[in-house]
Amino acid sequence: MSGMPRARTVLPSAAYAALAITDSVAAGRSSATARRLRYVLKPALMPALATAFLDGTRGSGARAGTGRLRTGTAAAQAFSWGGDVALLGTSERSFLTGVGSFFGAHVAYLAAFLSVRGEPEDYDTAGLEVALGLWLTATPLMSIAAGRQDPALRAPVAAYATILAGMFASSRMLDPALPRGARRTLQVGTALFLVSDSVLAVQKFLLTEPRPVVESVVMATYTAAQGLIAAGVASAT
């Protein structure tokens, strides 16, 4: 994984990539075997990524002021693991638990990114405008769609869409003193997170019946997003 220089990070990084690819393929299959396989693959994703990330960023002359960036990213990975496990369930309770876990992950990412923010004149204005536009359009649309399915989902979905847009926006406020490649890698990751969750919302609230290929797209973009964020943060620290 780019930005994780230690040799012993190669195995967990390769394991994460293999798990991500296999789970994304399995998500696109509707067979009972594929569904059972995902109960093994999906919970293993974040532990593999966290192992590579934490080992690759431990005690290697970290740049001053990036400790909270590393800690916040690790916390986000832990919350994400909870969300991954919860969303293996099919009940509304499982869905809300997953939403809550990923809400916590985005809060952790947002705090991590803001800990290394630059001055206002350094912000990516175009990126912030995209975040604002998505929040103003996607949040009410998804909240209304979720409310039609179940009124109890309206507020949680609106809150989640808000923190997701905030997380994306915070990645457009990074200190330009951080390596340019690290910032770009991290920002591509947050953009893919937006894509993944947007596709997931369409699948759950707008499509009349589930389509396995859509779930495959969700997992492919999600796992790529997590991996790129981890790699970007590792390069920055």
Image (tube, rainbow, N blue to C red):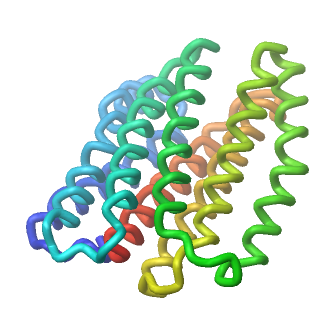
Location of residue 42 with respect to 156 vertically, above or below = below
Above-or-below relation of 177 to 53: below
Q: Which residue is found at the position 59% from the left and 55% from the top?
A: 193
Give the left or right position of residue 212, taking residue 67 as reference. right
Q: Which of 202 and 86 is in front in this view?
A: 86
Residue 152 screen position, x and y as percent: 77, 14
User: In the rendered picture of this protein, how many numbered marks are placed on residues?
Assistant: 0
Quarter-of-image position of residue 229: bottom left
Nearer to the camera, 216 or 108? 108
The residue that appears at 67% across and 62% down in the rendered structure is 169
Above or below: residue 155 compared with residue 38: above
**Quarter holding the C terminus?**
bottom left
Q: Nearer the viewer, residue 33 or 7?
A: 7
Could you say where residue 124 lies in the image, as x and y percent from the top left? 69, 78
- Residue 226 lies, with reference to residue 76, above or below; the image says below
Q: In which quarter of the image is residue 39?
A: top left
Left or right, 109 with respect to 156, comes to left
Q: Looking at the image, which residue is at 20% across and 66% down? A: 56
The residue shown at (55%, 45%) is 106
Find the residue positioned furthest to the left.
8
Tell me the quadrant of the picture where the N terminus can be found.
bottom left
Tell me the quarter of the picture where residue 43 sits. Answer: top left
Measured from the top left, where is residue 90 in percent x and y? 57, 17
| Closer to us: 176 or 233 | 176
